[in-house]
Amino acid sequence: MTNADSVRIRVFSLNCWGIRFLSKLCTERYAMIGDMLCKEEHDIVLLQEVWSEKDYLFLKKKLSLSHPHSHYFKSGVIGSGLAMFSKHRIRDTFLYRFSLNGYPYMAHHGDWFGGKAVGMAVLSIGSLTANVYVTHLHAEYCREKDSYLPHRVVQAWELQQFVRHTSAGADVVILGGDLNMHPQDLGNRLLRSYTGLRDAYLETDTFNGCEDGVTLIADNPFINKKELGPFEKGIRIDYILFKGSSKVDVFCDSMSTTKGSVPDHPFPYSDHEALMAELRLVSHTPVETGREKCIKEKDSAAGRVAELVDIVTEARTEVKVGLHCTESMRYTAARTGVMGLALLLLELAIAAVPWLALGAEQPFPLTSFYLLAALCFAILLTTFMLYILYTMELKSLQGAEDQMRLAVGSLQENLRGFPLAQPHVSLRKPPEGVSVLDQEE
Amino acid sequence: MTNADSVRIRVFSLNCWGIRFLSKLCTERYAMIGDMLCKEEHDIVLLQEVWSEKDYLFLKKKLSLSHPHSHYFKSGVIGSGLAMFSKHRIRDTFLYRFSLNGYPYMAHHGDWFGGKAVGMAVLSIGSLTANVYVTHLHAEYCREKDSYLPHRVVQAWELQQFVRHTSAGADVVILGGDLNMHPQDLGNRLLRSYTGLRDAYLETDTFNGCEDGVTLIADNPFINKKELGPFEKGIRIDYILFKGSSKVDVFCDSMSTTKGSVPDHPFPYSDHEALMAELRLVSHTPVETGREKCIKEKDSAAGRVAELVDIVTEARTEVKVGLHCTESMRYTAARTGVMGLALLLLELAIAAVPWLALGAEQPFPLTSFYLLAALCFAILLTTFMLYILYTMELKSLQGAEDQMRLAVGSLQENLRGFPLAQPHVSLRKPPEGVSVLDQEE
């Protein structure tokens, strides 16, 4: 597959929907996935929602010949669900766990227990170094009233930071996974603009798959049509992204997705469609180092920087909305806790009366007394734990907001070199609701 | 301070011991620290244990002229305690929170609530890019029976991963902070060997400070001598580490520490001694890129790789010991939970007898019944939460262990190019207790 100075690699990504005993036909689907991967021999396989390590080990055994290198990323209570198989040697791995990922009490959504993260592997593809990332962001359960939006924006922020800061030494960068975001969603724009990663679906020469590249489709028998809401045609939330470096140019020659069914099988691999992209890596003599090129690219594109300022500002607004929300939830938890404490003290005071005035009749039936006391304790304990939880969420949101403020400042500093681009930024209206400047340094 | 092609920068690091209302003379000490920093005008100030944001803001205000750039790293319930002040522009920041950091029920140790992490800032020093890291690892409360050792080893592992993967694009790398490890401790060797970071104390031409560079000393009035145990002279646990790149050589011209007191003041800045290192950055024309030099350095030093294999193997053993410990703690939690459940069911069964055989006397006094039921519930809830906690710990330990196994394999692969070095590795005895090979791929 290697030309004089070009290498072709095939990248595969699939959300496997692998919740044992809950996902339909889980075992059968893993067997199908294993057969297909074994036969197709993609260079890099990026899997999400492989929640059970047993299923990973099953695949690992099955793919031991076709994909001798693999890694399963562990995190959280259940695991990150992220797995990677490769024909090329995995030199190194690293995991970054997102600081925000839903709430433990939203157990029916389950995201918190999954320990969502981004996994990185450093691969040797011939003489090239490829940084390959696999990730899965927090699900969107209700697009109209998406209480997890700040969490997903912070995840996208951390994802772009992680990719940007860890990929300086790489010749090729590939990211695949279920981003749980529509193509033009804030987090997606943030990720692509900041890292310079390009969307294989938008870059490909030939595409074979569902219309508009959607990966959640109504034709998939595992999908409840209601989930798609107004997007009857489907939603594109799974991606393969890539970028080259000063040493290597990357092109996407072709891309394909499954279309809700698999030939000769009664059901598809998963409730998501699978993605496959064929990338061509073309080496050339570096004329400047990666960072210099990076800086040059940044500096030469004032418009891009100005756009980035807008996107980061929008993200910052979203995070601030989340901050206000979390603050009020923490306040509610604290208030409820104080009420529980007051109730407990009141009860104790009433109970103390006959004890102090010896002989007076016990005003409480004993059963009610214990039940009420237990209720008060339960309230106190719950609100205390919620308070801790919301405090941690606040810290993460504040941290992200601080970093975003710094980033905007840094980007605007860059823009000073572009007098023409400046007005675009300074004339920009502040986002509605929250002023961007109120916490400015 | 700039020669033709060399730059001098002064780096300061201090664990501020800033627990409001608990640390002695906290406000007074912050005022002293602020005055000194304002006067000394170090280029980069790395502070740990700035637990209260108010104290950070106090310092920020005080240092607004001398150090116009600053960042406070937020994480966990209380915060990471990490703060950075700089005379040079901070272009970007990023925070990595360690996956393991003690236990929430060890509230008196408090580490879990602090959200220990490593903070990174990308600084522009003239035309150079410096990646500056500040960190604080889990404390060592008892060296003889250190139940947190696996946590600290995993933290050191993640720290070296973070530094290594994020610093490929940097011209200079500086790390400062309270590592809570003696100079030859496993985690310290892991960090230095893997990243190539050099210890300013060992590299400096002139040193002015406590004997052996210790930073926890008996002469400090805030120190309880018992804490030092057999190390009466003191312990060196605070460090400034650095390395250059293909473009820049870094030298440590001088280093100093405080010596348990501050002239003209009745007490020192903190219970730790402060560190100051003067680094000289000498630029030269790059003859090869950072990664190439890195690879070359690695490849040219077979001995170093072999040593690294030993260190990672030792770390892996330590993590495995932690794994066994955590597994047995999780087992105990599960068993206690099952016993609580059995007790509850037994109680309900006994209480159900008179209910089924109508008219029979209630065998339980009502008070005991409710108290016992409450106890059972408390046991069930506690053990359930402990089970979740230990499961998360297990995932993190397993994840680190997997990565270490991969790293050893990768390093050994490198070693195949050095036939002379190979015997050193293959003849190495497996560590006692746990076989390294039992989970080999």
Image: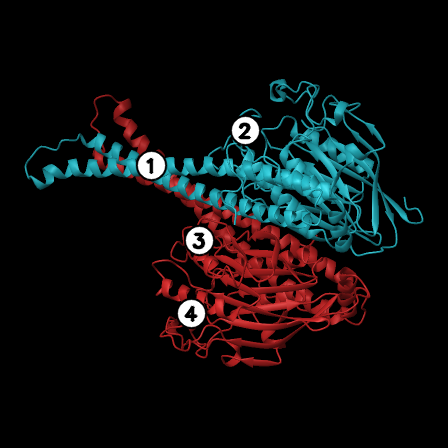
Chain colours: A cyan, B red
Q: Which mark is residue A335?
A: 1
Amino acid beneath label 1:
Arg
Q: Report the residue at 29% width, 36% height from top.
A: A340
Q: Mark 1 — on which chain does it sit?
A: A
**Quick one: SS at disc 3?**
helix
Please identify, in this view, whether the residue under mark 4 or under mark 2 is nearer the observer.
4
Q: Is residue A54 visible?
A: no
Mark 4 — residue?
B269
Element assignment for label 4: loop
Helix, strand or loop status at disc 1? helix
Confirm or deny contact between disc 2 and disc 1 (CB under 8 A): no
In this rendering, position of residue A39 left or right of residue B26:
right
Whether discs 3 and 4 lie on one chain: the answer is yes
Give the residue type that dot 4 points to: Tyr
Residue A148 visible to an observer of this rendering: yes
Chain on which label 4 sits: B
Of labels 1 and 4, the one closer to you: 4
Q: How many marks?
A: 4
- At label 3, the amino acid type is Glu
Q: Is residue B83 above or below residue B35?
A: above
Q: Where does the image place residue B202, in percent across and percent down from the top left? A: 61, 76
Distance from disc 2 to disc 1, alpha carbons, whole Å, reads 25 Å
Pointer 2 indicates a residue of which chain? Answer: A
Q: Which mark is residue B53?
A: 3
How far is mark 3 from mark 1, CA to CA?
24 Å
